[in-house]
Image (cartoon, helix red, strand yellow):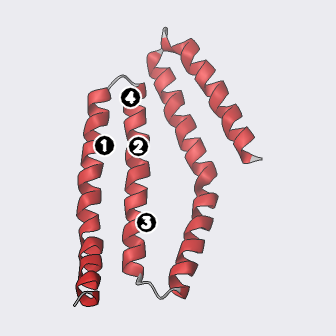
Amino acid sequence: MEIIQIVGISLVAAIMVVLLKEDRPEIALQISIVVGAIVFLLMLNKVASALNVLQDMARRANIDFIYLNTILKIIGIAYIAEFGAQICRDSGSSSIASKIEFAAKIIIMLLSVPILMAVLDLLLKILP
């Protein structure tokens, strides 16, 4: 089971970070970043499988791929922003983390405008 590997790696890293935080905070931060990247890389196959399922479902439902791609971009932005914000918080820069989250929200809002317009257009066609 992959979750056992991920939790094991994360616990070992967390212990190392706690031990090194006092004497070598720069190494502790690097360990946090590396472990986060390792966990992300371990999950890439799972993400690819989920994307394939979503694309297959969209193809069968005749959903325009532009909308699916936009939604996937939004999800990716949310995950990347959360990852970056957590790294900033781990390093003690919560104000920068807040700025990352704010920027992600703005980008997500801008990306969602075409989808919102399509939904509103569909509603206007349905209503008399």
Q: Amino acid at mark 1?
A: Glu
Circle on res. 89: 4
Name the amino acid, label 2: Glu
Residue type pointed to by label 3: Leu
The disc, 1 or 3, on the residue closer to the chain's N-terminal end is 3
Residue at the location (39% across, 25% down)? 91
What mark, if any, has residue 72 been given in the picture?
A: 3
As shown in the figure, which amino acid type bears the numbered disc 4? Answer: Arg
Report how far apart the C-alphas of labels 4 and 1 lie in the structure: 12 Å
Q: Residues within 10 Å of mark 1 (few under 14, many from 20)?
A: some
The span from disc 1 to disc 3 (Cα, nearest Å) is 18 Å
Q: Where 95 sits versus 22, above or below?
A: below
Residue farthest to the right, as pictured = 1
Q: Position of residue 8 (x, y in %)?
A: 71, 32
Residue positioned 50% across, 22% down in the render: 27
25 lies above or below 23: below
Task: Give the residue number, with chain letter if any, for mark 2.
Answer: 82
Q: CA distance from mark 1 to mark 2?
A: 7 Å
Q: Earlier in the sequence, mark 4 or mark 3?
A: 3
Characterize the local packing of mark 4: few (<14), some (14-19) or many (20 or more) Cα atoms within 10 angstroms.
some
Q: Which mark is residue 84?
A: none
For the residues marked 4 and 2, what is the alpha-carbon distance in whole angstroms?
10 Å
Please give left or right for residue 63 compared with residue 93 in the image: right
Give the CA distance from mark 2 to mark 3.
15 Å
Q: Are marks 4 and 2 in contact (CB under 8 Å)?
A: no
Q: Position of residue 106 (x, y in %)?
A: 23, 53
**Does 6 sit left or right of 84 as displayed?**
right
